[in-house]
């Protein structure tokens, strides 16, 4: 059973930084794509970034490029999202997710971690 547990959310002032973590367990993730998504109040869930566990190839939503960095530590089975230059509009619940490479949908999700950026 795949388990994804996010941590690292909190309250930060605009312009500040946070690093989110996603601890993954339950299987070997070498054949997986891991992703970060977010849902702001009253809005649809939004893709943030993804990384192929083996190889480290990354994809970002255009609005996150240059401010957010996704990475993973194979030895710790943990994925990270470094968020810099945070804006109030980045306020959302952030979720990590996983899917096998050949799948089109993410089928494993964490419980989410709240990020609040004050102006």
Image (cartoon, rainbow, N blue to C red):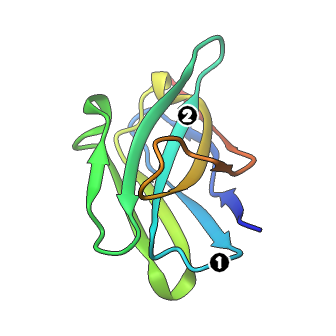
Question: In the image shown, does 79 or 67 lie closer to the viewer?
Answer: 79
Whole-number angstrom distance, CA of label 2 to CA of label 1: 24 Å
Q: Answer left or right for 14 relative to 84.
A: right
Quadrant of the rendered image containing residue 55: bottom left
**What residue lies at 65% left-to-right and 17% top-to-bottom?**
41
Q: Residue furthest bottom?
A: 75
- Name the spot of residue 26 as percent of width and height, x first: 71, 75
Q: Which residue is mark 1?
A: 27
Q: Answer left or right for 93 relative to 58.
A: right
Closer to the N terminus: mark 2 or mark 1?
A: 1
The vertical placement of 66 against 74, above or below, is above
The vertical placement of 75 against 96, above or below, is below
Q: Residues within 10 Å of mark 2 (few under 14, many from 20)?
A: many
Residue 10, numbered label = none
The vertical placement of 18 against 2, above or below, is above
- Name the spot of residue 52 as percent of width and height, x first: 36, 63
Q: Answer left or right for 24 relative to 66.
A: right
- Name the spot of residue 4 as percent of width and height, x first: 68, 61
Question: In the image shown, does 32 or 36 lie closer to the viewer?
Answer: 32
**What residue lies at 63% left-to-right and 49% top-to-bottom?**
9
**What residue lies at 63% left-to-right and 70% top-to-bottom?**
24
Q: Residue furthest front?
A: 102
For label 1, the SS is loop
The vertical placement of 86 against 74, above or below, is above
Question: In the image shown, does 64 or 2 lie closer to the viewer?
Answer: 2
Q: Residue furthest top?
A: 42
Q: How many marks?
A: 2
For label 2, the SS is strand
- Quadrant (top left, top right, bottom left, bottom right) of the N terminus: bottom right
Residue 38, numbered label = 2
- Name the spot of residue 89 as percent of width and height, x first: 47, 21
Q: Are marks 2 and 1 in contact (CB under 8 Å)?
A: no
């Amino acid at each position: 059973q795949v388990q994804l547990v996010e941590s690292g959310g909190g309250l930060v002032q605009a312009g500040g930084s946070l690093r989110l973590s996603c601890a993954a367990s339950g299987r070997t993730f070498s054949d997986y794509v891991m992703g970060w998504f977010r849902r702001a109040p009253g809005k649809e869930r939004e893709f943030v970034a993804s990384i192929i566990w083996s190889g480290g190839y990354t994809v970002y939503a255009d609005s996150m490029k240059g401010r957010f960095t996704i990475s993973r530590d194979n030895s710790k089975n943990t994925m990270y999202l470094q968020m810099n230059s945070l804006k109030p509009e980045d306020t959302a619940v952030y979720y990590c997710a996983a899917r096998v490479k050949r799948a089109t949908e993410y089928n494993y999700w964490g419980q989410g971690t709240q990020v609040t950026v004050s102006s």
